[in-house]
Image (cartoon, rainbow, N blue to C red):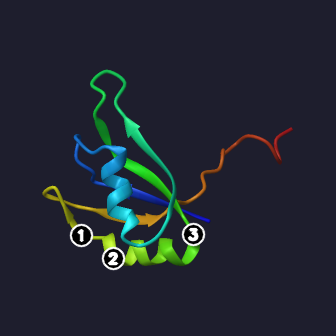
Amino acid sequence: MKTLFVTNLTPDTQEGDVQQLFGEFGTVRGIKIAMDVFSGNCRGHATVDMEGHEARAAMAGLNGRDYKGNSLRVSEERKRFNKGKGRGRR
């Protein structure tokens, strides 16, 4: 399972739009769209969970593609680490 990070989405983007877009390349296992609390609009980015080979195909096919006037950016999500907490501190 791979998680893709999608940016440059338009404010009117809904979960069904992302499902349809990525569904061209395989089965979408999960979608999380960052929504603005006050307006309810998309904040411009989302994560999409897909199987490895399907995720790579989606990255290749959608990165740079025009979607509602914006050029999508699709990449593999990178894990974040908490700096300064945990190991090594005394």
**Residue sitting at 44 percent across and 58 percent down?**
5
User: Where in the figure is residue 9, as x and y percent of width and height?
Assistant: 27, 51
Q: Is residue 67 left or right of residue 58?
A: left
| Label total for image | 3
- The residue identified by callout 3 is 51
Task: Tell me residue 79's x, y (percent).
Answer: 60, 56
Query: Real-space Cα distance between discs 3 and 2?
Result: 15 Å
Quadrant housing the C terminus: top right
Measure the C-alpha gap from mark 3 to mark 1: 21 Å
- Name the residue at 62% across, 65% down: 1
Q: Above or below — where is 71 with respect to 84?
A: below
Q: Residue furthest top?
A: 38
Would you place residue 63 above or below residue 83 in this image? below
Which residue type does callout 1 highlight? Arg
Residue depicted at x 30% and y 52%:
17
Pointer 2: what residue? 61
Does dot 3 land on a helix, a strand or a loop?
loop
Q: Which residue is mark 1?
A: 65
Q: Pinpoint residue 24: horizontal percent, then vertical percent.
A: 36, 70
Give the amino acid type for the residue marked by disc 2 in the picture. Answer: Gly
Between residue 79 and residue 64, name the one nearer to us. 64
Tell me the SS state at disc 2: helix
Residue 69 screen position, x and y as percent? 13, 57
Q: Verify CB contact (< 8 Å) between mark 3 and mark 1.
A: no
Give the secondary structure at mark 1: loop
42 left or right of 79 in image: left
Residue 78 to residue 24: above or below:
above
Residue at x 37%, y 24% (from the top left corner): 37
Mark 3 or 1: in front is 3
Disc 1 and disc 2 in contact, CB within 8 angstroms = yes
